[in-house]
Amino acid sequence: MSDGGVVLGHEGSAAEVAERFAALSPETTRSRTFVWQDPAPTVAAGAAMTGMEYMTAVVTGQVPPPPMAVTMRLSPIEIEEGRVVFEGEPGEEHYNPIGVVHGGYAATLLDSALGCAVHTTLPAGVGYSSLGLEAKYVRPITRDTGRVLCEATVLYRGRRQATAEATVTAADSGKLLAHGIATCMVLDGAA
């Protein structure tokens, strides 16, 4: 590097480096085990359901949660047409290098809730895809924040596009942590 920076050799993936540190520092090491199901059968079953039917099946446990929800510890807990509430359990496994939960956690929570709010408005065989997400971070999230809630509401649902807005709040205090808006493309399956 010409700017005086240091170039180091590749030391492996983050998981590989963490494994090496686990051997050196077992007293500071944590671990989580994940269990998930192949998402393909759930997606196929969901394609035959309306968005409300599919989201109801997820909330009631009739279909398995998507693997991302397991990894990020997110779950829809309330649904109605055009509105969903997700809960999340941010932990230190979501921390970034500066000692707080990475902004991507709140963005993922927002994106999930916003998309699912749109999904509740769709008939069977019609899907959606996120076109854009704008997230605003108001307060830091840490492992001490505890359970968080994300409430998303559809603002507009047209034939080809939908927009929704959402807030992320601390469940215990009700304090606003983040908020966002998304635009989704409505997909009729003909693509």
Image: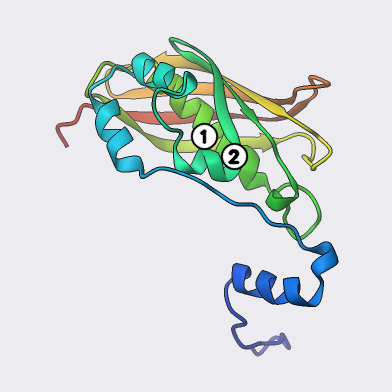
Q: Which residue is mark 1?
A: 111
Looking at the image, residue 72 lies above or below residue 172:
below
Q: How many marks?
A: 2
Q: Report which quarter residue 149 is drawn in.
A: top right
- In the image, 33 versus 172, the foreground residue is 33
Graded by Cα atoms within 10 Å as few (under 14), some (14 to 19) or many (20 or more), the crowding at tag 2 reads: many
Dot 2 amino acid type: Ala
- In the image, 37 versus 190, the foreground residue is 37
Q: CA distance from mark 1 to mark 2?
A: 6 Å
Query: Residue at left 71%, top 28%?
Result: 148
Residue 52: x and y, percent? 38, 14
Q: Which residue is mark 2?
A: 107
Q: Residue furthest left?
A: 190
Where does the N terminus fall, quadrant-wise? bottom right
Residue 121 visible (yes or no) = no
Residue 165: x and y, percent? 55, 22
Q: Residue furthest top?
A: 80
Looking at the image, residue 101 lies above or below residue 137:
below
Dot 1 amino acid type: Asp
Query: Residue at left 50%, top 32%?
Result: 112
